[in-house]
Amino acid sequence: MEEVYKTLEYIKKYAKEYTRPVTNILYKVTTRFLERLKRARRTIFIVAFLTPFLLSLVLVYGLPSALSVLMSFTDMDLRFELDWSNPLYKNYYIILGMKDPRVPVVTYVTALYVGVTILINAGFSLVLGILTTYCIRNETIATTLRLLWFLPRISPVVIYALLWQWFADPRVGPLTILSKWIGLGEVSWILDKPYSQILMIIVNGYVGASWGMVIYASAVRTIPLEILYAARVDGASDFKVITKIIIPLLKWPLLFVTAWQTLSLLGSYVQILTIWNGFAYVSGVEVWSLFSYHSAFAAYKFGYSAALAMIIVIVSLVLLAVYFKVFGFRRMLEPSRIEV
Amino acid sequence: MAQKVAVYLVVGLIIGLIIGAGVGWAIAPKGVPEEEYKKVKTELETTKAELSEVKALAEKLKALIPEELAKAEGVIVIRAWPGAKAYDKYRLDNLKDAAELLNMVFKAIGLGITIKFEGTVESATLEKVIAAYKAGELVDILGCGHEWIGPYAEAGYIIPLDDYIKKYEILFKDWFPYPWAWESMKWKGKIYGILQDTECRPFYFRKDVLRKLGWTEEEIEALPEKIRRGEWTIEDAIAVAKEAMARGLVKYGFYHRPTPGAQPMFVFYKQFGGVIGDPATGKLVADKSAWLETLKLFYKMAYEEKTMPAMAGISWRTVHTDFVNGRVLFWFGGSWHWAEYQRVPYHEELGKVPEEWEWENLGFALVPAPRPGLKPATNTHPWAFMISSQSKYPELAFLIATIATLPTFDVRHCIYGGKLPARSTTYTVPEFKENKFLSSIVYMHEYTDVLFNNPKMPVYVKLVFEAVTAVEKGTPPDKALSDLISALKTEIGDEIIIRD
């Protein structure tokens, strides 16, 4: 680089009068290019650094997503070919126009499922997170408690589902016996609404709670103890410490957990499929993703299923935008104004 | 002196000649007796004739060799996904041995081909078939339930076998004479499958409970026959169930499967005169009146008479444990359960039950007629071998799959897997006849039927199960029927014909 500059300077100095305009231009262009290159170096480095990741993102997520978008405009069936729908938006018309009688029911069930389960996954897990870090000071007990909450997540889905199936078995399940004791009578926690829906929420909430708990727990530990001590010295009760100091400081993890869990709940159906295989709809637990799964792998309407999935994607994006707005995403990314 | 020498010489010469002649006579070959000569000649002629016959036969055999093999040389790889997990291991072994048998024949007639058989225990499931087909890697022989013939044929993954079956007619002489065996292998009039095995769905009953109700041994033993003649119906069964429940002998009268399936939903439907599919168009059929009758029956059994719980959601384990331990009187099961009870410890005291215990306590019959005037019935779910449209040697693959179902091979699969045969002559094999249970359910094949080969059949089965679950929980049958019909229309659409 230095050499080039020297040469340029030399040319500039010794160039004859009549060549001066040309050399001037040459000089300007070259130096500008070199300046740009200098600045671009950083960009090139970033691009080179990110390429492997971006490439896999495009190959593993980008292409299938693009294919799904295409598929949603087709009548794709078992032949697995892109037979364009007529009109092109047919699948969306059927879904959004509620021409499929199952769509309204499935929409309601999904709203109920996501709306209530998120309270457990983002709300109850907050309680757990604070409880196992701030309230219980004995590390052994806290870790044991957290581990217990981890059990449903680390056990394989099929085993987890089988356990619940047994637990809620309409003939011999402890849940059935328990509900008889407390005077609910002969109810089937699998088939009778709203019990089946409550069960669906508990089953999924139990799995999801541990995830939020870990995020919150580690976030609580990053709060400098001095602040907590100072608050206690000033006479704040435990409750005040939690509501006035800990929770406001957990805003970012709270957004993260809520957003993440909403998205994963919208797309989850495995536990429901394994427990209610074959009678999810009559039991009132057929959520949107399960409906999409059934459309693809029971009815072989791959095009229709892709359209259903696309709607979940759009809803997720909208929700994400709403969360960012509500939690003030931009403000949170700015450097803190208060020294903590 | 010279004279003397000459005389000696002459005499010596004469003697020498005489000796020479004698030796010559002694060692000269004797003439063959005419008798022997004739024998040898005939033998030679016969051999010549035989040789030309063999030559002609070899020519004939060579003419029989499929075109695809006539050009081939060296090692031919035939791959298969027969579906041979656990007790179905002979589905794979039979194919392997059939390929070996063909290799021996090829060697004997001097064909320069060896088959290398590569099979796994997997079955031809939808996701795998689609993925493999799109990659151009679909295996030669596909094994799966017959209901997939429709989807796979429609998508062009498998080929019709009518021409091969005609060519090798002799290998199909002992297929079942019943129409269902052929119909289940067809899609829109063409045969796509080779029947691999079958089973049936009996109506099990607890002999010990009937004894406690005061039935004599003769009455109990005569029950299957009474059911077969249509003299004992579901109505009688409900009455007996109510009596047994009232006397506290059982918790419930009936159990049926807790997940979507054919038994007894589609069995009742057929008994009420319902048609599952239309062979001419390949479309499914829903007869409203037959479904209404069926739903009414479930409503009566579960909701009105309380002889059966709503089955959906009850775990399989509970279903089996309750029946094996005598808490349920009647069970709409499957023929494979007989073997399952001997292998899985469902009994709370005995664990795995010995077969003698089963003969003592369990009985089995056809599914009784729903009401007098109708017929008993059952259902079967044939397993099919299909030939991939991407197979390079479809005829060879077809031959291997066909040979693997011949009685010699068929019988060992039946005995080991608790299945019913693919061939009617397998019934006559002594080994099969010795199997008391299998040989005593063989008659059910006359009363059996299959589901229909249409891609949307699983959806139909699922929606029917939803309707049955609804009536069992107390939804009036009319309402459940109208829900079922509207669901069928939206989920299956043009592929189902709805009739009154």
Image: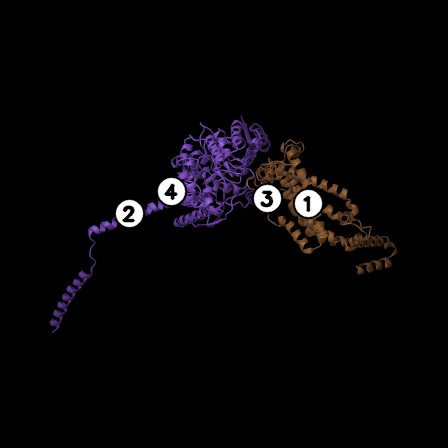
Chain colours: A brown, B purple
Please tell me which residue lies in front, B321 or A275. B321
Distance from Cα at disc 2 to Cα at disc 3: 81 Å
Question: Which dot, 2 or 4, sits closer to the camera?
Answer: 4
Q: Which quadrant of the rendered structure holds the N terminus of chain B?
A: bottom left
Who comes first in sequence, dot 2 or dot 4?
Answer: 2
Amino acid at circle 3: Trp
Label 3 marks a residue whose chain is: A
**Residue B89 visible in image:** yes
Residue B128 occupies quadrant: top right
Label 2 marks a residue whose chain is: B
Give residue A164's mark: 3
Is label 2 in a helix, a strand or a loop? helix
Q: Callout 1: 10 Å neighbours few (<14), some, many (20+)?
A: many
**Residue B134 visible in image:** no
Labels 3 and 1 within one chain:
yes
Give residue A121's mark: 1
Distance from Cα at disc 1 to Cα at disc 4: 61 Å
Is label 1 in a helix, a strand or a loop? helix
